[in-house]
Image (cartoon, rainbow, N blue to C red):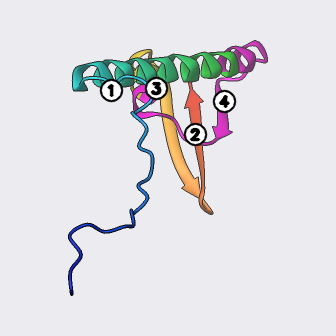
Amino acid sequence: MLYDDNPSYTIPMPKVEPPKGKLLSAEESRKRADEAVDNALIKELQEIATKINAASKEGNYSCSDDGCLKPKTREKLEELGYKVEVGNQYNQSWYSISWK
């Protein structure tokens, strides 16, 4: 007999777990992502406001730091009248904000 209709062995199957949590709709995921973007913008603007306030109290008309600014952060600063410059030197990003 070449083929056994009733095999005496079984192949173990892995236990399949249902997904943890609920799968969100695309609209819910979009809302969640939008909220995260808004929160990140608020946080970055708060950090920059602290730097601007400290610099202006010392009599400076600009502040700068290493790192990148989010595009929306730059847009908001420019809307408020700040001049924003960004650059990259030796693979190190930086930004400068001035108000003179």
Q: Nearer the viewer, mark 1 or mark 4?
A: 1
Quadrant of the rendered structure where residue 45 is?
top right
Pick the quarter of the image with the N terminus: bottom left
| Lower position in the chain sequence, tag 1 or tag 4 | 1
Quadrant of the rendered structure where residue 58 is?
top right
Residue range highlighted in magenta: 52-74
User: Where residue 63 sits: x, y (%)?
Assistant: 66, 29
Q: Which mark is residue 95?
A: 2
- Label 3 crowd bin: few (<14), some (14–19), many (20+), radius 10 Å: some
The type of residue carrying mark 3 is Thr
Q: Is residue 90 left or right of residue 59?
A: left
| Lower position in the chain sequence, tag 1 or tag 2 | 1
Q: Is residue 17 visible?
A: yes
Does 80 sit above or below residue 88?
above
Residue 65 in magenta stretch: yes
User: Where residue 84 sits: x, y (%)?
Assistant: 49, 33
Residue 72 in magenta stretch: yes
Q: Nearer the viewer, mark 1 or mark 3?
A: 1
User: Where residue 8 sits: x, y (%)?
Assistant: 37, 67
Q: Is residue 55 left or right of residue 48?
A: right
| Lower position in the chain sequence, tag 4 or tag 2 | 4
**What separation in Å lies between label 4 and label 2 (alpha carbons)?**
9 Å
**What separation in Å lies between label 1 and label 2 (alpha carbons)?**
39 Å
Which residue occupies 41% across, 43% down?
Answer: 16
| Lower position in the chain sequence, tag 1 or tag 3 | 1
Q: Which mark is residue 23?
A: 1
Residue placed under numbered mark 4 in the picture: 63
Q: Nearer the viewer, mark 2 or mark 3?
A: 3
Residue placed under numbered mark 3 in the picture: 73
Which residue occupies 24% across, 75% down?
Answer: 4
